[in-house]
Amino acid sequence: MRILDSIVSTDREATFALLKQLAVGVAKLFAPHCEVVIHDFGDLERSIIQIEGNISGRKVVGGATDLLLTQARNGNTVRDFYNYQTFLPNGREMKSCTMFLRDDDGRAYGAFCINLDIGIFAGFHRMLGDFLTLESDSEVSETLSDDIQRTIHIMLIEAVNEIGAELPIMSKEDKIDLIARLDEKGAFQVKRAVPLIAEELGLSRSTIYNYLTKARVKAEADSQNGA
């Protein structure tokens, strides 16, 4: 029995030794925002046997956390915990992982814990959220370009998308609707609009003028009917 206990003790010591080495590497990799803590459940009042990158202000021979005490008390150490929210005593926000060390019978004898200080990142996240927030009910959009040909092209594509059609298969009615939408968007305030749109659609300038006239007549009729 003593031999078996000695073997088990030696295995655990080897595991703790390896984890202590790993703790140093992880803490240094994510410094100064990372803390790694190793617990030995042999004495829950003094369970901390290693702490690297100290953020929480705890010390070696410090006691187990409320989570560890609760899980150990309930025997609920079958699963590990990843990416859960934790807090320092001063309210500072953290993100943590707790992985239990288990013997051959599945009983936990320790824990390997990684704690990340995300307070500063949470602040940046909120700041970015405020910075990137748009008016939810805004229907305004804009493409910042000083190339009028590109601007007309973008307006044309937007109008095509609004219609839900594709240029190669558009009917005459769709084309008149397209011209009407471009007129509403103000495209024809540009002197070069007609030749640019004619080239995009593969139509003659006279056809564009014809469609524009039809679109405006229809818009005027609709306006009078709605008055």
Image (spheres, rainbow, N blue to C red):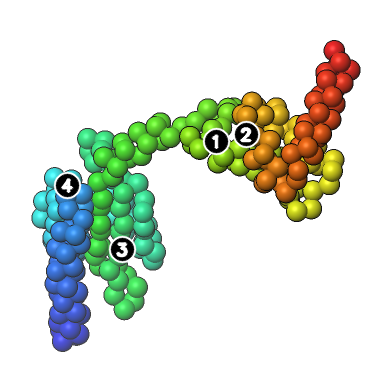
Q: Which amino acid does label 3 sit on?
A: Met
Residue 184: % across, % down: 70, 27
Choose the circle earlier in sequence order: 3 or 1: 3
Location of mark 2 (residue): 192
Residue occupying the point 34% across, 73% down? 106
Residue count near mark 2 (Cα–Cα under 10 Å), binned few <14, some 14–19, many ≥20: few
Quadrant the N terminus occupies:
bottom left
Q: Which amino acid does label 1 sit on?
A: Ile
Which element carries disc 2, helix, strand or loop?
loop
Q: Is residue 74 above or below residue 176?
A: below
Q: Do the residues labelled 2 and 1 touch (CB within 8 Å)?
A: yes
Q: In this view, does 141 lie above or below 114?
A: above
Choose the circle earlier in sequence order: 3 or 2: 3
Location of mark 1 (residue): 148
Location of mark 3 (residue): 99
**Quarter residue 123 falls in:** top left
Q: What residue type is labelled 4?
A: Ile
Query: Which label is found at residue 55?
Result: 4
Choose the circle earlier in sequence order: 4 or 2: 4
Which element carries disc 1, helix, strand or loop?
helix
Between the residue at mark 4 and the residue at mark 2, the CA separation in whole angstroms equals 65 Å
